Structures are given as structure tokens and as C-alpha cells.
Amino acid sequence: MFRLQTAFAVLALAATMSSHAAANTALCKLFAKQQWSEQGTQTLDDCLRLIDGQSVDRNAENALRFGSWGDTLLAADLSVYYRSENGGADWIAIGAKNHSIDPATMSSRAPPPAPTPRPRPAPVAYVAPTQPVPLVMPTAADVAAASARDAGEVDAYTSLGVAKEQRNRCELMVQQLWRVQPESSLEDCARTMEYRGSYDRNGQLRAYWGSVYLTADPKSIYVSKNGSNWVRLRERK
């Protein structure tokens, strides 16, 4: 009888451990060349390693690689892992590389089975700016010219050919990732960049408002239609 009870106890413990292990795994997918590829059921750490191991230009500014673990979108740059729970609109750092990530801190439920694969949003569309032209920061000459013209808010709107009440999607650089904001006015986008954006290596804030470029130095906020001819929107408060 004792041996039988012991055998049942061992089986129960094994079932519990198996259930716990399954709870910490989910379907892992890699996103490369605009295609998703399934990598089977993986732990979070293993899925992150698979994503991180994808071929990428290491000389690129962010060297980003993408994937998913269950319903959670994942990304990796040269030193940090990120997650997104809303289709790539917002990205949150979840840990530095070479450190184990606790799955309990993430929404890790795998999607229910479906008869046909469900389309998933491409994260690249959210972490890259809408404008493909490289952003060229205003030079000292540009700043001096804008100041000499006394280009205030009205002149900036006139130069851009947009109305104050016009609304567009706002994208700003936050911790080396492009973050998409709800549609807003140009001034609201500038204010969001001012208070939520991250400075780049040149000490500049960067954002896009529709097809309009925005940047800011410690004194003023500038706008441009082409990324090279800058007009001062306003001084920073």
C-alpha cells in the first residue's frame, strides 16, 4: 500500500511540474523579410534568444529584430529586449540581454487554436518612422536664419501650409524606438515630443507629424516639410 501511495504521489508531482512548465511556454514566431515563421512552443528566454539570433545589420542604428511569444510582440536591439501588448503601438523594455526574463511579468497566454493562421500586425510598421527620408537636423545656420526671420508660430503654419486645428498621427523617438501617438494637432505633437521624447546622441528631440518633420534643441522647436529647410515653430517654455 505504501508503495502504491508513493507511486501516485510521484505521478501527481510530475503532472504538476509538467503543467507548470507548459504555463511558462507559448508559440514562438520570428518576423523577418515581412514574413512570420513558427518556431514551435518555447520558453520566453528561448524565444528571445531565437529572435536575437536572426541575421541583421549590426551597424544599423538600432539593429532591431522582431518576433512574438503567444500574443506578445517582442523585439531585440543590440542590448535590450522589448515587448508590446497592443500590436506594436507602444514598446516597453523588459530587460537587458544576458539576464533571464520572468514570464510572470508579461501577458503570456498563447492564442487559441484557429482553423487558419490569423494575420498579425507587422511590428516594423510601428517602430520605423512613416517618412523614409533620413532626418537631417537643423544646422547652426538654419537656426540663425530662423531667428533672423523671427519665424513664430503663425509663420511656421503658413510655411507648412497646414491649419492649427488639422490633425495627424504623431510619432516620436523614445529610448531609440519610434513610438506612435494618437492623432493630434501639430502643437500637441510638439508638446508630446517636448515632454515624452528622448534626446538622441546629438542632443536633439525628434518626431514626425504626418509628413512634417519636428525637432527640438534646448531653446526652440523646429518644423520642416522636407527635413532640411527648417522653420522655428516656437520657443520652448
Image (cartoon, rainbow, N blue to C red):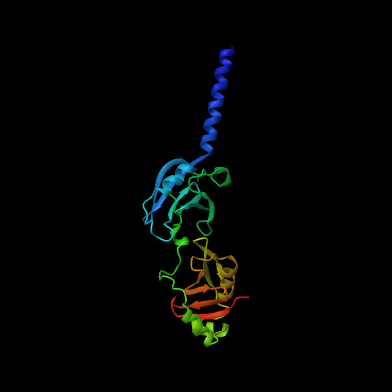
Quarter occupied by the N terminus? top right
Q: Residue furthest bottom?
A: 149
232 or 192, which lies in front?
232
In the rendered image, residue 202, in percent from the top left (x then y), is placed at 49, 68
Quarter occupied by the C terminus? bottom right
Q: Residue furthest top?
A: 1
Q: Residue at x 41, y 69 (%)?
A: 132
Q: Residue at x 52, y 31 (%)?
A: 18
Marker count (numbered): 0
Q: Residue at x 60, y 67 (%)?
A: 195
Q: Is residue 68 above or below residue 203?
A: above
- Can residue 124 be seen in this snapshot? yes
In the rendered image, residue 99, in percent from the top left (x then y), is placed at 51, 44
In the rendered image, residue 47, in percent from the top left (x then y), is placed at 45, 44
In the rendered image, residue 62, in percent from the top left (x then y), is placed at 44, 59
- Can residue 116 be seen in this snapshot? no
Q: Residue furthest right?
A: 237
